[in-house]
Image: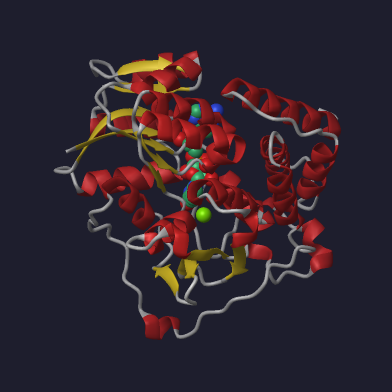
Amino acid sequence: MKRLTILGSTGSIGVSTLEIVAAHRDKFEIVALTGGKNLQLLKKQIEEFSPQVAAVISEESAIALRKMLPGVKTEILHGVPGMIAAACAEDATMVVAAIVGAAGLVPTVAAIRAGKDIALANKETLVTAGHLIMDMIKEQGVQLFPVDSEHSAIFQSLQGHRSDDVKRIILTASGGPFSQYPLDKLKEVSIADALNHPNWCMGRKITIDSATMMNKGLEVIEAKWLFDLPLDRISVVIHPQSIIHSLVEYVDGCVIAQLGVPDMKAPIAYALTYPERVATGVRGLDLTAIASLNFFEPDLQRFPALQLAYRAAGDGESMPAVMNAANEVAVDAFLAGKIKFTDIALLIEKTMSAHDAHSLGSIEEVMSADLWGRKKTRELLGL
Ligand code: NAD
Ligand code: MG
């Protein structure tokens, strides 16, 4: 029996994780859940999975949730201390980190320090604080399993091979809704157009990141830390069908890939049950129906955010945290209808150009860099 805590249980990854738990009650028990604004869904999850602890962002939400659950024994906490308490809940052995954005960093760090294995969806944790996190993982002797489909594909393609024999890894990207869109019309796309991902059904922030391809940029940085590879051994290729989830090329010229229909339940389950595999309800591949797969180079003029992520990754130190913060503010502004789609990358670029990268020796320093990036981007936005 694996005892799990899910940080961000009301999000897209959180819900898929609980679907796997519900299908394998004999294998999993839920110790703690955390959510944000969707109290109705969190209430339903608490009733179904009876966690010892639940945490929400605000005190008002905690009060409201307690009222919605009379007689329920779950302890309901709030704020960052509540998220940390949930992340550290004693009985859990694995924490699924599925909060969106840099808000996921502190609870994930708390879980590592409490000796929990981590199933990592929150890529922003590695983007902002990769060097500190990887050291912490080693020091604590815990395991870190990737949930992101590309990183899970690489992790799977590495099984049984020596990391010394890896020549490079190749991350696939769908290219999002705009990979073929007329370039001169990109500034006019609507919020609904940008949220209309061709292959994946995900939270709003990562869906916009997929449309700008900042998501792939964040994933390059995530891969650099997870697989301890320099940037020049991490390639990106656009593969519009999202069937090949990523590939590893070895020194002998052999390439090993992982394939499947695009459904996050497969990589989530692998992170939860590694090295075992369990039924997920994910459809098998019908190769003859797919018939052909396509690949092409990403166009950096079309996707300037991807180039910015390479630049931040090359600068290192505080730059990826600042870039990530700028992206979060810019994506929020786009989703609030305050800026155009093409302004997202422009704002990130301006914030990065105003920043002098410096080394980050602690999680507190990462959070200061994050805060600096947010403030600067808001200032540029006139907010
Ligand atoms: P989502 O927006 O659907 O869910 C986010 C969760 O985080 C919700 O439970 C929300 O309540 C919670 N949350 C939001 N702000 C918070 C805050 N300030 N404090 C505490 N909790 C907060 O997001 P998602 O699509 O499930 O993505 C979650 C993470 O997983 C992201 O880092 C994303 O990049 C990564 N990821 C997602 C997918 C996917 O298919 N959705 C795939 C790969 C990686
Ligand atoms: Mg991904």
Where is residue 67 drawn, in percent x and y? 35, 15
Residue furthest out toward the left: 26
Where on the picture, by quarter, is residue 239? bottom right
Q: Residue 225 location in percent, x, y?
A: 54, 45
Residue with the most extreme front position: 164
Residue at image position (31%, 42%) is: 18
Is residue 37 shown to the viewer in this render?
no
Q: Is residue 174 above or below residue 268?
A: below
Q: Is residue 8 left or right of residue 20?
A: right
**Residue 84, percent from left and from top:** 43, 20
Q: Indicate the quadrant containing the N terminus: top left, top right, bottom left or bottom right.
A: top left
Q: Is residue 219 left or right of residue 97?
A: right
- Looking at the rendered image, the quarter that the C terminus falls into is top right
Residue 87 vs residue 109, the one in the foreground: 109
Image colouring: secondary structure
| Residue at 61% in and 36% down | 128
Please tell me which residue is depicted at 48% across the width and 58% down the height of the picture.
Answer: 150
Residue 93 lies, in percent from the top left, at 27, 32
Q: Is residue 119 left or right of residue 23?
A: right
| Residue shown at 36% from the left, 50% from the top | 268
